[in-house]
Amino acid sequence: MGHGGDVINELTADHREIDSLFARIQALPTGDSQRRRLADTLTMELVRHAVAEEEHLYPAVRRYVDGGDDIADKELSDHGEVERMLKELEDLEPGDSRFDTLVAELKRSVTTHVTDEENRLFPLLANSCSREKLQELGEFIRRAKETAPTRPHPAAPDTPPLSKLLAPGLGMVDRIRDLLSGRGRG
């Protein structure tokens, strides 16, 4: 993921990519080994997306949007729920009966979160930030996704400054694990 444009366009493009991954997983028959590969790709994309939002989007919401603390806290809570599900999914094989149930639960949770961001948070942010600030945040988001972890770490901090300090290190370890295991390769 790295689409260009302001923060809203960048994150909205990520949302569509994530929607597509869910659809591809659900289109395959139960037990198909490609579902594991797609679930790994989905996990990688969701984790990078979430870390970038936690590092840059939600601090901006807190700073620029009226009532931003409550909005950011709710979004962070959503991320925690998704990350716990991703951690559970990581250990399941496509033939496991829990795999399909968990993918469906994950999709519902992510879809609810995305709808809230796109219909409520993004318009509020667009109305409270300059075009230049939105562009700058888009660039910050893209850079954060490049070094973000690729695996769920539910116990890791989700707010700056600790998240900004730890995420690149966790990301490096995750990418080494991915390289050695072949995870994330087509």
Image (spheres, rainbow, N blue to C red):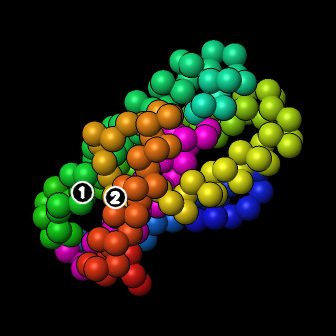
- The residue drawn where x is 73% and y is 61% is 4
- The residue drawn where x is 69% and y is 36% is 122
**Can residue 36 be spotted in the picture?**
yes
Q: Indicate left or right for 154 with 11 as reference.
A: left
- The residue drawn where x is 71% and y is 54% is 139
Q: Which residue position holds label 1?
A: 89
Q: Main secondary structure of the magenta part?
A: helix
Q: Which residue position holds label 2?
A: 151
Residue 53 on the magenta segment: yes
- The residue drawn where x is 86% and y is 43% is 132
Q: Amino acid at mark 1?
A: Leu
Quadrant in the picture for the N terminus = bottom right
Q: Which residues are magenta?
A: 31-57
Where does residue 76 sit, x and y in percent of width and height? 45, 32
* Element type where label 2 sits in the image: loop
What is the number of the mark on residue 8? none
How many C-alpha atoms fall within 10 Å of the one at disc 1: few (<14), some, or many (≥20)?
many
Q: How many marks?
A: 2
Q: CA distance from mark 1 to mark 2?
A: 11 Å
Toward the top, the furthest residue is 67
Vertical placement of 126 versus 106: above or below? Answer: above
